[in-house]
């Protein structure tokens, strides 16, 4: 049997944190530092990082995908967002780390209140963005302290059994999937550099590098990412920095006509040469490591700060990528529907566990013959585990799925033609009236986003409240964004657009985002309904002064009708749900066996 894409081992090592923190404090003393910031980041600012860069998990035990810690000689703090408060309390020793909610006490505020006059706080400039380093510098200055860039990361200095960096093979992402040759993409980037009056673009985000050169890799879990960076000059050949051991002769030959292939060790020296030539270098200060900006400016170059132009190009899918996304979602929807039919039959016996569900769903996807990986660790939570927003089931936490309760399953897949992400909340046994009320409110918010029509230039923040209004009416809410961007056989979490209170980027036709409102009752259950949606032109209204946009729902799978309170829905909301389910039946039935099709007919019967 093929190896599973997801492990259920407990990767957090809470008991080891004490000796590790002590070793780090001793190293800080040797380096003349009073404290050090440990981000959950690698030098590429990836969401998923290779084991060799899991410094935050190593020092604290916290394994979430976002957060940071500050370790001082006499105290330490871990900073997490609302998705991870429960997880952090379970994984982290409170005698070692105070757990801080980012929205209440961000690191810069904690620094201002905690550091003393004359203290030195260290940071690794490769692991912090330019903007982050600037905030930290200001916070230290306000406390009378100093932020110090280290040459040797003190965590690395004491991490004696640190894993080796990854060497995943690089592959060429064919034009039948990419829809645009890399040479044409480079031409668009050069044109944009001319508009921006910059002489070179530093591409520090491997997602942007992979998109630009039509390559993919396997250096991090669940994202087909090659850890590679690039420098694209306005004139002349780009330089692509990638470990040569990752390249076959065929891949090397395919890239040689596009760029000069350089080893990663040459990157810093080439940045220095850019600065020494007094080049105007475009950098996205929100994602570029502070070390890059320091090297360029200290060697004489000039930074032109602004959004990475590749991010918007990558997020706006072309027709080939859109067709691929639709095909991937039909394939994935059929696999998920097979799982849902199986689950409804198997779950009432009370013998299934959360891990059983994850394994079964992966098998259904694997049986498509096209699965390359899952797109993130599956969130499989029954009862109170479903209330942990980013719960990851382990052998220790694995809960039996037994009546009566709610089962939340958030999963996704990587196919060469598209990336998927879907959440369904399923009734096991008989749901309570409260569960049905909350589910229906979440569904109404989901439908409000799916049906939204808005003028060009609208940001995700402007429509985020559509999803929350039914919950707000009952004094309820959820502590995560309503939606994130999704890549094309790349990251399942992609910028710059998102549907959230912080989503300032304008939505554009061709962008793919998630639509995933939820509700979580701590210690009891969680609810989330997630489909991916494509931004597209909406029918124009007579007399409209701006072109209008809307969403096409890409995800195809039934929404559990047993959890809906029909009387709480409007006629328009019922019409949307019935139309969605009719489309699910039409598109998926040809891909299913007879028994599953019969189940699908029942699961998608009109609500009205």
Image (cartoon, helix red, strand yellow):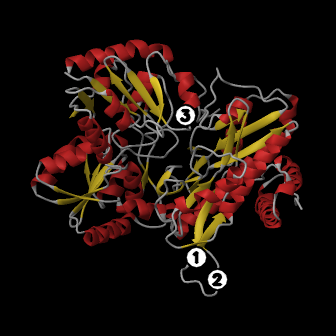
**Between marks 3 and 2, how big is the CA–CA gap?**
43 Å
Percent across and percent down for residue 376 are 56, 41
Disc 2 is placed on an element classified as loop
424 lies above or below 179: above
Crowdedness of circle 1 by 10 Å Cα count: few (<14), some, many (20+)?
Answer: some
Q: Is residue 96 left or right of residue 195?
A: right
Q: Quadrant of residue 122?
A: top left
Mark number, residue 84? 3
Disc 3 is placed on an element classified as loop
Crowdedness of circle 3 by 10 Å Cα count: few (<14), some, many (20+)?
Answer: many
Mark number, residue 548? 1
Q: Nearer the viewer, residue 139 or 509?
A: 139
Percent across and percent down for residue 562 are 86, 47
Q: Nearer the viewer, residue 305 or 1?
A: 305
Percent across and percent down for residue 176 are 52, 64
Q: Is residue 290 left or right of residue 246?
A: left
Q: Nearer the viewer, residue 493 or 116?
A: 116
Contact? badges 3 and 1 (CB < 8 Å): no
**Between marks 2 and 1, how big is the CA–CA gap?**
8 Å
Question: Mark 2 or 1 closer to N-term?
Answer: 2
Contact? badges 2 and 1 (CB < 8 Å): yes
């Amino acid at each position: 049997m093929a190896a599973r894409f997801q492990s259920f081992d407990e990767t957090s090592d809470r008991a080891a944190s004490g000796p590790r923190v002590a070793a780090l404090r001793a190293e800080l003393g040797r380096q003349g530092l009073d404290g050090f910031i440990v981000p959950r980041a690698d030098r590429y600012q990836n969401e998923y990082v290779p084991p060799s860069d899991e410094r935050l998990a190593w020092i604290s035990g916290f394994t979430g995908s976002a957060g940071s810690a500050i370790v001082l000689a006499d105290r330490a703090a871990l900073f997490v967002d609302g998705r991870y408060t429960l997880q952090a309390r379970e994984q982290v020793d409170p005698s070692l780390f105070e757990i801080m909610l980012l929205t209440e006490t961000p690191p810069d505020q904690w620094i201002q209140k905690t550091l003393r006059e004359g203290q030195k706080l260290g940071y690794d400039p490769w692991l912090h963005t330019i903007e982050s380093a600037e905030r930290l510098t200001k916070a230290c200055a306000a406390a009378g302290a100093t932020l110090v860039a280290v040459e040797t990361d003190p965590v690395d200095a004491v991490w004696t059994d640190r894993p080796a960096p990854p060497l995943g093979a690089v592959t060429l992402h064919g034009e039948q999937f990419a829809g645009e040759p890399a040479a044409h993409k480079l031409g668009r980037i050069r044109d944009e550099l001319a508009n921006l009056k910059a002489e070179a673009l530093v591409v520090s985000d491997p997602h942007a590098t992979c998109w630009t050169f039509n390559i993919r890799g396997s250096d991090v879990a669940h994202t087909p990412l090659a850890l590679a960076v690039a420098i694209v000059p306005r004139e002349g050949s780009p330089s692509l920095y990638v470990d040569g051991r990752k390249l076959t002769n065929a891949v090397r030959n395919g890239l040689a006509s596009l760029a000069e292939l350089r080893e990663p060790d040459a990157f810093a020296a080439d940045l220095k040469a850019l600065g020494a030539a007094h080049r105007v270098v475009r950098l996205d200060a929100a994602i570029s490591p502070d070390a890059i900006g320091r090297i360029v400016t200290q060697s004489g170059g000039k930074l032109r700060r602004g959004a990475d132009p590749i991010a918007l190009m990558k997020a706006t899918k072309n027709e080939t990528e859109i067709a691929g996304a639709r095909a991937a979602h039909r394939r994935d929807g059929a696999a998920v529907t097979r799982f849902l039919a199986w689950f409804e039959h198997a779950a009432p016996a009370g013998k299934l566990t959360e891990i059983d569900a994850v394994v079964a769903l992966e098998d259904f996807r694997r049986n498509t013959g096209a699965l390359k990986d899952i797109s993130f660790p599956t969130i499989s939570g029954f009862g109170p585990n479903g209330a942990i927003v980013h719960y990851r089931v382990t052998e220790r936490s694995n809960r039996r799925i037994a009546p009566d309760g709610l089962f939340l399953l958030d999963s996704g897949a990587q196919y060469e033609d598209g990336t998927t992400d879907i959440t369904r909340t399923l009734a096991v046994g008989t749901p309570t009236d409260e569960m049905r009320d909350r589910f229906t409110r979440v569904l109404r918010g989901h439908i409000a986003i799916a049906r939204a029509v808005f003028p060009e230039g609208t940001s995700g923040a402007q429509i985020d409240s559509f999803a929350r209004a039914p919950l707000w009416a009952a004094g309820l809410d959820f502590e995560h964004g309503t939606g994130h961007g999704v890549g094309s056989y790349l990251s399942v979490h992609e910028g710059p657009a998102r549907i959230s209170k912080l989503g300032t980027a304008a939505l554009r036709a061709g962008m793919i985002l998630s639509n995933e409102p939820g509700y979580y009752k701590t210690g009891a259950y969680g609810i989330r309904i997630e489909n991916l949606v494509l931004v597209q032109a909406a029918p124009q209204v007579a007399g409209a002064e701006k072109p209008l946009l809307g969403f096409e729902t890409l995800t195809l799978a039934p929404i559990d009708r047993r959890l809906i309170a029909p009387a709480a829905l409007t006629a328009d909301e019922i019409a949307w749900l019935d139309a969605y389910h009719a489309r699910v039946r039409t598109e998926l039935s040809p891909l299913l066996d007879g028994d599953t099709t019969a189940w699908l007919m029942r699961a998608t019967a009109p609500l009205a």
